Structures are given as C-alpha cells and as structure tokens.
Image: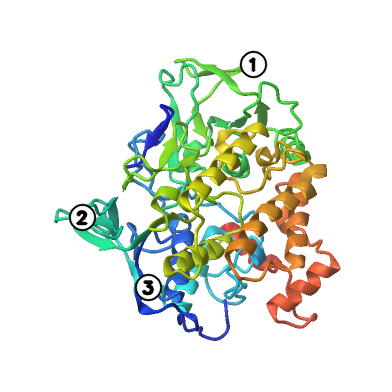
C-alpha cells in the first residue's frame, strides 16, 4: 500500500420471507454475519436469507434503522468528531426531509407507499426522517428480519480465521448498554462465520478541511454530524463551510425560524460567481433571506473569532459548522492490509464493483459503499449478488481480472479529472462526453446538465443492475419523475417539495403505483397534513 492509505484493521398482505424456489443445496449454504442494521444491512440480510443462508445481523444500537434512527444526542465532548470512532452513530438533524421522492425509495417487492390516516405517519412525497424509519420497521415486520438481528451488539473485530483450512472469518463482539451506549463489562464473544458483509454506513465519521487558524479559533466549531436543531444558534452569526445538500438544509433551518442573526455559506471556490454555486436555487435563497449570505472559501481563521474569506472579506462569527462530508471508517476490520482507506477517507479499496475486495472475495464484501444511488433499491441488487456468489449460483471473475477492472475504473476517473472524494459515487463517468458529472450535486447542478446527469446516473446503476441481479428495472415514469424533481431542486430548493406539476405520464404511473382510481389518487398530503408536519 502507498503511504497515502491506511490499512484496515409496503404491501397490503403479509409476505412470508421464504427462500427462493431454486435455493442451492445445503452444502452451498453459508453462515453469514452482517455488520450493521441500517437500510443497507437490512436489505442485504433479507436477500441472503432468501438465498438460503443462515444470517446474523449485529447492530450496536437499540433498534434498527441506522442513520434513520434519529438520536437527539451528539458527541458533546467532541463536536468536530476528531476522535475516531465517533461515540454517536447518527448524523441526522431533526428537520431532515427526503430529497428523493418516496416513489423511488422502496425495494422492488415492498414499495414505500404512503399511509394516509395512520397516526404518526407522514404520507407526503418527501417525508421526514421518521417516516423512513417507520418504513424500515414495516420492512422488518413484513419479512421477519428482526429474527436475524442482535441489537445492542457492537462488533469490535473482524479478521480471517488463520487456523481454518477453508477461509472463514472470526467476528468478535461485545454487548452495549442500551441506556448509555457504553460497552458492558463482560467478556467479548467470538464467533466464526463463512462470510462477513460489512454494512455499517458511511455517514458517521466526519471529514474536516484543513484551514489555517482552525486550531486557534476559540469559538464554537462543530461538524454537521453534531447538528440537530437550530435553537442553540439563536442570535448568532453562523458560518457554514460547504455548499452541498446538508449545508443548504441547515442554512434554511437556521434562517427560517431558527433565530440565527446571520448565516454565511462558505463555498469551496475562490469566488462566488462560479456557475456551479450560483444556481437559480441559490439566487432565490439569497433573495428570500436577507440574513443569508454567500462567500468564497475561508482563507484563515483568527483567534478573536474573525473569519477571513479568499476574496478578502471578513466577519466575526459565533459558530462554524463544517458541512464537509464524511470519511469511510471500519475500525473493527482487520484485513492485514488487503483493504485500505485512503488518507482523506474517501476511497475504500481495492473493491471490485465497490463490493468485493478481490483478494478476500467472496468471504468479505461491502454493501452501501456507493453514493448517489437510489436506496434501498440499489442495496437490494447488491445484496442479491452477494448472496448468489456465496451460494455458488454465480461466480466472480478470477482475482487478477477483478484487480485489473478496479485499476481501470480508478484510472478512467483520474483521467476524467474526477476528485478522489467522488471515488464511490456510482453516477458514471464517460470522459468523452462529460468529465465532471461526479462533481454535480442537487445543489450545484445547472439546468442544462440535469438530463445528462440523470442519464449517466441511470447508466452505471443499470449496468450494475443488469449484470448482477434479475430484478426488473425502475419504471420509466419514475425515471421521468426523478429528472423533473432534480430540475425543480435546481430552480428553487425551498419550494420543490410542494409543487404539483407532475406530467400526465407520471400521474398515470402514480395512480397505478398507489393502486387507486384516478378520482381518489392523492398526489400530495393535504394542506392540513403539511401544516401538522411542519409544526412537529
């Protein structure tokens, strides 16, 4: 390894989660451990059991859901998250609502249908985080997933069992106190599995920038991982470092009733006239909120609280929130250097198709490393592929071929000028057409690029889908809906969730999806439901 890497140490009737009709013989069934019971782990676990494998899911928290299990607690003693691993897993802030429509966020045979009239449920197209959590709980009930899950169980080490003739994996775990989250004072338990699927998520360990004076700046600094509600910032001048989706959400949270005196977004560009930053949505946000301001990247921080930007402008801030993304982190995993995370925490490798480390496949695999995919739809295909490789129903290429494919994929992105932080964005790169697709986000995309972005996101996603699963593709009306919503986000981030502008083909598809007649197929929640959820 180079010096820049770190070696790793809804349905109306009940669906019985039976194994597939053509399951492999007993000799091909494996005992599999899944690390993590978030969206990726739960989806993969179901696919593994459907293939006939014996599955144990280990989850350190007191319930399933991963990031969607909201935790009001934060790493109070380490708000920047500099000490790895973080003590609080969740990075969810209270006001989170989906950017993607619920129509595109269900597994193939258990759609994320709205539940109208059910207390506590949020039937909107773009519901809050609690609704996603409830969907995952419904998924677990529908397919008896909880039978496989051990809650309050933290995996502390995963390593190959050296004393085994056939490659197997030792998994060491410890019980966690459900009240404190601390490991209980009892002996660690070690078990041996045929395979391990790592699905612990990648939105917990903060990634921080390097800014001159950051250590000396004496006022409040935190990562968005530790942001929950705007109340603590009332009357303050707040600087948000970053201009991605979380920065936009938090900025609006702070200025729309949060009571912050002023909010300043610091984009990662030397000037703020960059077209990737000054989108129509950004212009409207700035016009709608007199206390919201856009600045170029920070040049330096002064101990007295002064923030100096690249254009020479400056202000005295009370708090800085770093909305700068997350590092991949697998503190429990010991592969003897066969898998590594790069210095910036942005690339895990080598991973064939972002899933299998060639030298350790198929006994070790990863679900959920990819970004910019529709979930859990993509996790379903990934989990099915892993399950079938483990059962012998399908085979991986030879190790040498997988390594070659990994290197060619990396080199193509490098030649295309794609930054390392987008190493696992699966949105596709075609250097002959567009070299910067991976740098486009919902908050930085120009309208003319929208269809091109969707095209290549679809392209690489469907290439994976077609090669490794037998599941049907997403319906065309859902793809059309996705493109329309991305255009709406680019135009006005504050209002896109409330628009009623579906095309006729989308409305027709939606009616079929809901299973209702055209007369009673609700497109959005009622105004009363919208108001009720805004108050919560």
Name the front one of labels 2 and 1: 2
Indicate the quadrant where residue 252 lies: top right
Label for residue 57?
none
> How many discs appear?
3
Locate residue 264, reporting x and y percent: 61, 29
Q: Quadrant of the C terminus?
A: bottom right
Labels 2 and 3: the sequence-earlier one: 3
SS state under label 1: loop
Q: Which residue is mark 3?
A: 29
Whether residue 535 is visible, yes or no, is: yes
Residue position for label 1:
313
* Alpha carbon distance from label 2 to label 3: 21 Å
Q: Secondary structure at mark 3?
A: loop
- The nearer-to-camera label among 1 and 3 is 3
Q: Quadrant of the N terminus?
A: top left
Q: Which residue is rendered at x = 79% and y = 50% of the image?
A: 451
**Residue density around tag 3, few if under 14, some if 14–19, many if 20 or more, within 10 Å:** many
Residue positioned most to the bottom: 13
Residue under the image location 64 percent in, 35 percent down:
418
- As rendered, which of 119 and 362 lies closer to the eye? 362
Q: Looking at the picture, how far across and down is residue 523, in whole percent?
A: 74, 69
Q: Are marks 2 and 1 in contact (CB under 8 Å)?
A: no
- Left or right, 128 with respect to 71, comes to right
Q: Secondary structure at mark 2?
A: loop
Q: Residues within 10 Å of mark 1 (few under 14, many from 20)?
A: few
Q: Could you give the CA–CA distance between mark 1 and mark 3, rounded to whole angstroms?
A: 64 Å
Give the label on residue 163, or none: 2
Q: Position of residue 299 (x, y in %)?
A: 57, 17
Q: CA distance from mark 2 to mark 1?
A: 63 Å
Q: Residue furthest left?
A: 186
Q: Is residue 209 left or right of residue 197?
A: right
Q: Earlier in the sequence, mark 2 or mark 1?
A: 2
């Amino acid at each position: 390894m180079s010096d820049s890497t770190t070696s790793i140490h809804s349905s109306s009737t009940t669906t019985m989660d039976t194994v597939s009709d053509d399951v492999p013989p007993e000799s091909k069934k494996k005992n599999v451990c899944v690390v993590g019971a978030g969206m990726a782990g739960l989806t993969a676990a179901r696919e593994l059991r459907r293939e006939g494998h014996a599955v144990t899911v280990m989850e350190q928290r007191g319930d399933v859901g991963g990031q969607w299990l909201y935790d009001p607690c934060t790493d109070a003693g380490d708000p920047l998250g500099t000490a790895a691993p973080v003590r609080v897993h969740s990075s969810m802030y209270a006001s989170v609502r989906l950017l993607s429509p619920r129509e595109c966020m269900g597994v193939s045979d258990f759609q994320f249908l709205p539940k109208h009239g059910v207390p506590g449920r949020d039937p909107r197209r773009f519901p809050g985080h609690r609704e996603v959590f409830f969907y995952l709980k419904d998924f677990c009930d529908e397919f008896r997933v909880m039978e496989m899950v051990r809650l309050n169980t933290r995996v502390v080490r995963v390593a190959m069992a050296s004393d085994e003739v056939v490659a197997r994996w030792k998994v060491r775990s410890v019980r966690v106190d459900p009240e404190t989250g601390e490991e209980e004072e009892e002996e660690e338990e070690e078990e041996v599995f045929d395979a391990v699927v790592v699905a612990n998520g990648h939105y917990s360990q903060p990634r921080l920038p390097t800014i001159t004076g950051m250590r000396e700046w004496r006022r409040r600094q935190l990562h968005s991982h530790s942001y929950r509600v705007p109340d603590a910032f009332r009357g303050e001048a707040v600087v948000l470092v970053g201009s991605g989706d979380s920065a936009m959400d938090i900025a609006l949270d702070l200025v729309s009733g949060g009571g912050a005196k002023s909010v300043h977004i610091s984009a990662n560009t030397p000037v703020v006239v960059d077209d990737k930053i000054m989108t129509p949505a950004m212009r409207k946000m700035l016009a709608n909120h007199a206390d919201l301001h856009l600045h170029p990247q920070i040049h330096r921080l002064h101990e007295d609280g002064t923030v100096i930007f690249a254009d020479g402008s400056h202000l005295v801030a009370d708090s800085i929130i770093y909305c700068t993304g997350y590092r991949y982190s697998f503190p429990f995993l010991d592969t003897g250097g066969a898998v590594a995370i790069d210095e910036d925490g942005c690339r895990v490798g080598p991973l064939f198709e972002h899933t299998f480390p060639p030298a350790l496949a198929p006994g070790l695999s990863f679900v959920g490393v990819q970004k910019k995919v529709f979930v859990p739809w993509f996790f379903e295909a990934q989990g099915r592929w892993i399950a079938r490789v483990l059962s012998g129903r399908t085979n991986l290429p030879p190790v040498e071929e997988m390594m070659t494919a990994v290197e060619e994929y990396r080199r193509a992105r490098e030649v295309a000028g794609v930054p390392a932080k987008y190493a696992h964005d699966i949105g596709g790169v075609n250097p002959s057409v567009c070299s910067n697709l991976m740098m486009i986000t919902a908050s930085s995309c120009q309208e003319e690029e929208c269809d091109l972005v969707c095209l290549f996101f679809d392209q690489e996603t469907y290439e994976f889908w077609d090669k490794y699963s037998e599941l049907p593709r997403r319906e065309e009306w859902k793809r059309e809906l996705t493109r329309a919503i991305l255009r709406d986000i680019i135009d006005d981030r504050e209002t896109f969730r409330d628009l009623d502008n579906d095309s006729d083909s989308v409305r027709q598809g939606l009616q079929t999806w809901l299973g209702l007649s055209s007369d009673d197929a609700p497109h959005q929640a009622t105004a009363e439901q919208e108001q009720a959820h805004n108050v919560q």
